[in-house]
Image (spheres, rainbow, N blue to C red):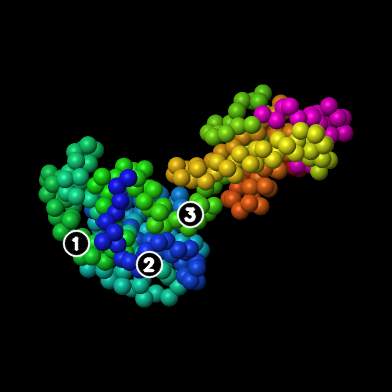
Amino acid sequence: MAKGRESDVNKAAAKPADAQADGTTRLVLVTGPSGAGRTTAIAALEDLGYEAINNLPLSLVPRLLDGPLPRPMALGIDVGNRDFSAAALIELIDRITRAPGLRLEVLYLDASAEALIRRYSETRRRHPLLPEAQPVAGIEQELDLLAPIRMRADVLLDTSAMSPHDLRAEVARWFDMGEIARLAISIHSFSYKRGTPRGLDMMFDCRFLTNPHWVPDLRPLTGLDPAVAAHVAGDPRFADFLSRVCGLLLFQLPAHIDEGKAHLAVGFGCTGGQHRSVVMTEAVSKALAQAGWQVSKRHRELERRAQTLPAGKGAKGA
């Protein structure tokens, strides 16, 4: 994988540290010539847990930063903005550097003129600085315009030989706030009779477990009811199944992160989507959350059931 030139990287930025380790909020300002990969980098930072805003006019940045930032932020600055100038951007960098409570890092995405010309040729886009001229003229002008900004970069990545996947990996290497913070996991329960949910990455069949449907007192309840959960957990195969599923997920999650995934969807299905799959979804979600992962859960059939019930009546156990 192509790597950024270490000689161009501020040594003070040596290896990414926790964004809140020193009590400040991390702010990454992303800039560089058009076509060098700013949009890809902004998307990668958003997947890493940053609040990302691209192409924000310089004049609006101070207003955005006036109040406290709830989480780390990434701002993409483009030369095509109506109020862009190198002098204004340098002044903004100095202003943010002096601001208490903020830890500014300037990420400059560089690329050779040859690489940028090739990319413009492949996409057939016009250059934002000189849309009526050949891209090479706009590229040369932009590189000259950004030269002072390049000198102020804390992290400089030469993307000339990088694929988008390479760039995302390099951005993660510098700005990752921790593996767990950047993979969102959603756990779904569903009924096989209604089809599998779209977008699942992994799916587990719960129909071999003891079915509460055949217990008259449990039939109208859902897997959210403690009595139903206890009944399903009473199956001698349940504990081993739960342990194996959680073990598999905890083993695979870091590998999904290494591949650049930002979201993983896992489904548990049963016949009606009301009992066994719900119990497993709740149990696995709890186990992953206790391990520190960011987890959300959704019970598709219970949501459908609630929508069809008369007003004021909810699903029992929900």
Instruction: Please tell me which residue is depicted at 26% across the width and 45% down the height of the picture.
Output: 161
Please name the residue shown 65% across and 41% down the image.
246
Please report whichever mark, 1 or 3, sits nearer to the chain's N-terminal start. Answer: 3
* Residue 266 position within the rendered picture, expressed as x and y whole percent measured from the top left: 59, 37
Determine the image quadrant of residue 5: bottom left
Kind of residue at badge 2: Leu
Boundaries of the magenta span: 205-225
Residue at 61%, 39% (x, y): give it: 248
Quarter of the rendering occupied by the C terminus: top right
User: Could you say which disc has been placed on residue 104 in the image?
Assistant: 2
Q: Are marks 1 and 3 in contact (CB under 8 Å)?
A: no
Question: Magenta span has 209?
Answer: yes
Residue found farthest to the top: 193
The residue at which mark 1 appears reads as: 147
User: Residue 49, labelled with which disc?
Assistant: 3
The percent position of residue 198, horizontal first and vertical second, equals 55, 31
Name the N-terminal-most of marks 2 and 3.
3
Dot 1 or dot 2, earlier in sequence:
2
Local packing at callout 1 (Cα closer than 10 Å; few below 14, some 14-19, many 20+) is: few
Which three-letter amino acid code belongs to the residue tagged 1? Ala
Visible residue check, residue 209? yes
